[in-house]
């Protein structure tokens, strides 16, 4: 699974992108975010409030129940506003 992090999420995790294969595998975005939080350190800080993070899976907006596959690209970014 290709994971990409933007803005303050990247700053907290300390990485912009990584390929990660969770063991055991995760089947949903919510489970992935919980597993990332459980990694501790900057990941725990970045994913402490998952409601404050927006996610795209393979270019489409995704929610906690989104089903994941090992070949997916998951992008984490903060909410954005315009004006």
Image (cartoon, rainbow, N blue to C red):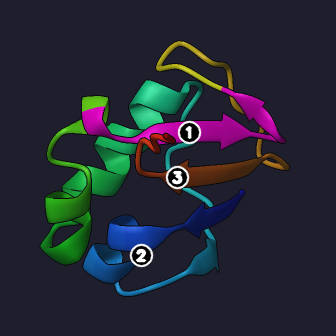
Q: Quadrant of the N terminus?
A: bottom right
Question: Would you say the residues marked 1 and 3 are in contact, meaning their CB atoms lie under 8 Å apart?
Answer: yes
How far across and how far down the image is residue 80, in percent?
A: 46, 44
In the rendered view, tell whether residue 56 sits above or below residue 9: above
Asked whether 54 falls inside the magenta stretch, the response is: yes
Quarter residue 16 falls in:
bottom right
- Magenta-highlighted stretch: main secondary structure? strand
Indicate whether 11 appears above or below 78: below
Q: Crowding near pointer 3: few (<14 within 10 Å), some, many (20+)?
A: many
Q: How many C-alpha atoms fall within 10 Å of the one at disc 1: few (<14), some, or many (≥20)?
A: many
Left or right: 17 with respect to 11? right
Q: Earlier in the sequence, mark 2 or mark 1?
A: 2
Q: Residue at x 69, y 31 (%)?
A: 68
Residue at 51 percent across and 41 percent down: it is 82
Q: Residue 62 is drawn in which quadrant?
A: top right
How far is disc 2 from disc 3 in space, using C-alphas? 9 Å
In depth, the one of 62 and 39 nearer the eye is 62
Q: Identify whether 23 is placed above or below 60.
A: below
Q: Using the numbered discs, state the Cα–Cα distance from disc 2 to disc 1 in whole angstroms.
A: 13 Å
- Residue 74 image point, x, y percent: 67, 49
Q: Position of residue 71 (x, y in %)?
A: 85, 49
Instruction: Tell me what residue is drawn at x 14 percent, y 75 percent.
Output: 41
Mark seen at residue 76:
3
Read off the residue under disc 2.
Answer: 10
Task: First in sequence, mark 2 or 3: give its number.
Answer: 2
Q: Identify whether 69 is placed above or below 13.
A: above
On the image, numbered disc 1 is attached to which residue? 55
> Upstream in the sequence, badge 1 or badge 3?
1
Q: Position of residue 23 (x, y in %)?
A: 50, 53
Q: Which residues are magenta?
A: 52-61
């Amino acid at each position: 699974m290709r994971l990409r992090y933007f803005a303050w999420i990247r700053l907290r995790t300390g990485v912009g992108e990584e390929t990660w294969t969770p063991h055991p595998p995760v089947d949903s975005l919510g489970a992935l975010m919980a597993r990332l939080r459980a990694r501790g350190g900057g990941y725990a800080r970045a994913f402490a409030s998952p409601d404050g993070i927006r996610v795209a899976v393979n270019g489409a907006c995704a929610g906690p129940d989104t089903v994941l596959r090992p070949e997916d690209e998951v992008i984490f970014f903060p909410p954005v506003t315009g004006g």
